[in-house]
Amino acid sequence: MSDYLIEQWTDWIVGSLPEEQQALYTYVIHMEDRLAEVVATEGEFMDRLKIERPHQLAADRFGMTLFELLQTLRDIEEHVSERLEQMLAEVSWVDCTHLVNGGDRKVFYVSLPSAGTGKE
């Protein structure tokens, strides 16, 4: 499956979360991404996490304990993963090669599940 499509569906799933969860998840992911951009190795990333404690800062920002923040993030990631797996399971491929003249190229119709437009 296309990485682009998976990223789009993931963004939609996160966007369908309740506002507080969406804000928390987006804040932490952006914070981690910014940190990852300035380090060269995984070890350096982990060292910076220990020193700068960005997750504790995020917990403070959202009025949570560090444990509550990490638990909430885990719950959100489980929800996103489960929903994404459901959407991927709904994709269907239909071989339409026989409908195309020449038949030297495979042609498929791909039915994608609707991501919807509102909150789940």
Image (spheres, helix red, strand yellow):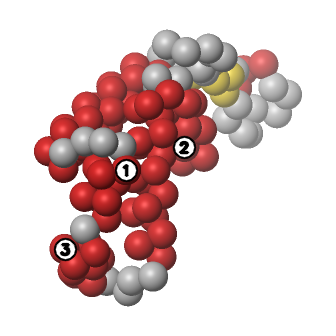
Q: Is residue 120 above or below residue 50?
A: above
Name the mark nearer the viewer: 1 or 3.
1
Q: Place residue 15 in its image quadrant.
A: top right
97 displayed left or right of 28: right
Name the mark nearer the viewer: 1 or 2.
1
Q: Amino acid at mark 2?
A: Glu
Query: Considering the numbered disc 2 on the image, is that residue within a helix, a strand or a loop?
Result: helix
The answer for how far apart the CA atoms under marks 1 and 3 are is 18 Å
Residue on which the image places disc 2: 7
Q: Residues within 10 Å of mark 2 (few under 14, many from 20)?
A: few
The answer for how far apart the CA atoms under marks 2 and 3 are is 29 Å
Q: Earlier in the sequence, mark 2 or mark 3?
A: 2
Residue at 59% x, 20% y is: 115
Q: Place residue 67 in its image quadrant.
A: top left
Residue at the limit of the structure toward the left, as seen here: 67
Residue on which the image places disc 1: 61
Query: Considering the numbered disc 1 on the image, is that residue within a helix, a strand or a loop?
Result: helix
Q: Earlier in the sequence, mark 1 or mark 2?
A: 2
Q: Residues within 10 Å of mark 1 (few under 14, many from 20)?
A: few
